[in-house]
């Protein structure tokens, strides 16, 4: 009934704390967690593991556990048992159920359901992840995406590397958002596997691009999301500049009473346009459509800036047969003639990164999956897993975003 691998039941005790089952091992050989095995016993003791409940009754397994002097590890280690992970005080089945639930529900609910502590859940997640995340995941990596994600209300950052060829699955995460953090990834990857990377998408700014260029021969791709973010930022700068001019025109220098702004037509035109300008035109409301139409009729500088932003976005949705390089060069020419300072600055940045922007279009790489990680981390925090450390958040990212499949005891 318990289906314990490698042992049979030697005794059953009904106690205050639940049912205690004594196990007797079948194998005489001792196996180190590293795989090395021997017949020589260093010493013996007894250990108790918590197993999945029997109905509403707690169940514990007790067995003799031995230590061995491992010639491979060069030290004394505790033997591996078939029903539990090294150092665990829970059975493998129990831990798999916790990990499966942690992918799906909040921590408090798990502690109530399985009657274990918060700390136990955190340790189990770390152990199960270590069991599933192998170095071999880095063997066949050809196209990566690198990005920073924030945790703990944006004050702390992680660097995350995803595999574009595995549907954006996370293959590595480390604490910090500098180039030095990414260096750790390439150290782990090693020179041979680093050279095998053909393309890498990342933010235009920051140290990532520099490290990727130094450690790989990959084609560098400017992540479209970040390019559009820069364009939106430039557009917002135009809007703010225009708003300030309009306010000065109305003779108001300090915080403006709403009534005075309403009287000024230039300022009124700008009011509430912010979201319409940033949104996709397909999702405009009736009044937002109207606002943009007014700006267009007025041949407003903000309308011209908005058109430039949308034309840059078009780079990523060109109809088949249109050449991206021609589109981008025509855009650069228009932007540099626009006489709008924020758009001039944007065109300089885009020109500087022209090659990597076009590489991203050519290879169709985008870090959109990585951007989705920010909301996943918010969910992980909300469910109570990310509070104590970066290591806890990283373990949960591996558990939930790296494609780990947990098989439930009932599914074996
Ligand atoms: Zn060993």
Image (cartoon, rainbow, N blue to C red):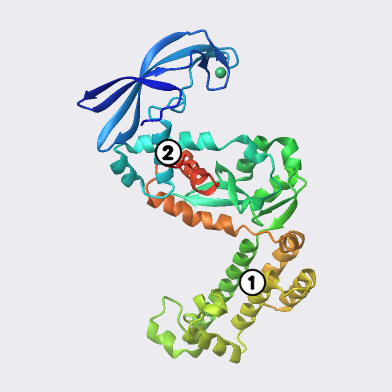
Residue 147 position within the rendered picture, expressed as x and y whole percent measured from the top left: 60, 52
Marks 2 and 1 close (CB-CB < 8 Å): no
Q: Secondary structure at mark 1?
A: helix
> Residue pushed farthest left?
16
Q: Give the labeled residue for mark 1.
A: 342
Q: Is residue 30 above or below residue 265?
A: above
**Is residue 252 found left or right of 110 in the rendered image?**
right
Residue 104 position within the rendered picture, expressed as x and y whole percent measured from the top left: 41, 50
User: Which comes sooner in the sequence, label 2 or label 1?
Assistant: 1
Looking at the rendered image, the quarter that the N terminus falls into is: top left
Q: Nearer the viewer, mark 2 or mark 1?
A: 2
Residue sitting nearer the eye, 379 or 84 = 84
Q: Is residue 149 above or below residue 250?
A: above
Residue 185, image quadrant: top right
Q: Can the viewer see residue 49 in this picture?
A: yes
Q: Secondary structure at mark 2?
A: helix
* Ligand 1 within 8 Å of the CB at mark 1: no
Residue sitting nearer the eye, 68 or 372 = 68
Q: Residue at x 50, y 38 (%)?
A: 129
Residue 108 position within the rendered picture, expressed as x and y whole percent measured from the top left: 32, 45
Q: Give the labeled residue for mark 2.
A: 409
Taking the image in four quarters, ligand 1 sits in the one at top right
> Residue pushed farthest bottom?
297
């Amino acid at each position: 009934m318990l289906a314990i691998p490698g042992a049979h039941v030697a005794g059953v005790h009904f106690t205050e704390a639940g049912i205690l089952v004594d196990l007797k091992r079948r194998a005489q050989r001792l196996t180190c967690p590293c795989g090395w095995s021997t017949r020589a016993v260093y010493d013996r003791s007894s250990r108790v593991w918590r197993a999945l409940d029997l109905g509403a009754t707690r169940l514990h397994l007790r067995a003799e556990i031995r230590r061995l002097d491992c010639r491979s590890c060069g030290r004394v280690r505790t033997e591996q048992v078939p029903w539990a992970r090294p150092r665990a005080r829970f059975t493998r089945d129990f831990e798999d159920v916790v990990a499966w639930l942690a992918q799906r529900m909040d921590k408090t609910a798990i502690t109530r359901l399985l009657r274990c502590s918060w700390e136990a859940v955190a340790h189990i997640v770390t152990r199960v992840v270590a069991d599933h995340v192998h170095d071999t995941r880095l063997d066949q990596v050809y196209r990566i995406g690198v990005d920073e994600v924030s945790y703990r209300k944006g004050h702390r950052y992680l660097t995350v590397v995803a595999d574009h060829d595995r549907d954006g699955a996370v293959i590595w995460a480390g604490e910090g958002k500098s180039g030095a953090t990414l260096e750790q990834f390439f150290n782990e990857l090693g020179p041979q596997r680093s050279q095998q990377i053909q393309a890498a998408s990342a933010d235009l700014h920051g140290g990532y691009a520099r490290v990727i260029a130094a450690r790989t021969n990959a084609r560098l791709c400017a992540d479209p999301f970040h390019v559009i973010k820069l364009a939106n930022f430039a557009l917002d700068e135009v809007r703010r500049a225009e708003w300030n001019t309009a306010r000065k025109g109305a003779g108001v220098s300090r915080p403006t009473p709403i009534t005075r702004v309403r009287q000024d037509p230039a300022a009124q035109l700008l009011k509430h346009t912010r979201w319409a300008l940033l949104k996709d035109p397909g999702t405009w409301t009736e009044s937002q459509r109207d606002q943009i139409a007014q700006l267009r009729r007025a041949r407003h500088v903000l309308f011209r800036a908005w058109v430039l932003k949308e034309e840059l976005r078009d780079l990523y949705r060109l109809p088949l047969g249109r050449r991206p390089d021609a589109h981008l060069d025509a855009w650069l020419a228009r932007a540099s003639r626009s006489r709008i300072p924020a758009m001039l600055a944007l065109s300089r940045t885009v020109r500087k990164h022209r090659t990597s922007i076009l590489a991203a279009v050519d290879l169709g790489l985008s870090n959109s999956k990585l951007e989705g990680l920010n909301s996943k981390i918010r969910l992980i925090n909300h469910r109570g897993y990310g509070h104590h450390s970066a290591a806890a958040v990283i373990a949960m990212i591996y558990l939930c975003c790296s494609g780990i499949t947990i098989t439930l005891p009932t599914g074996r």
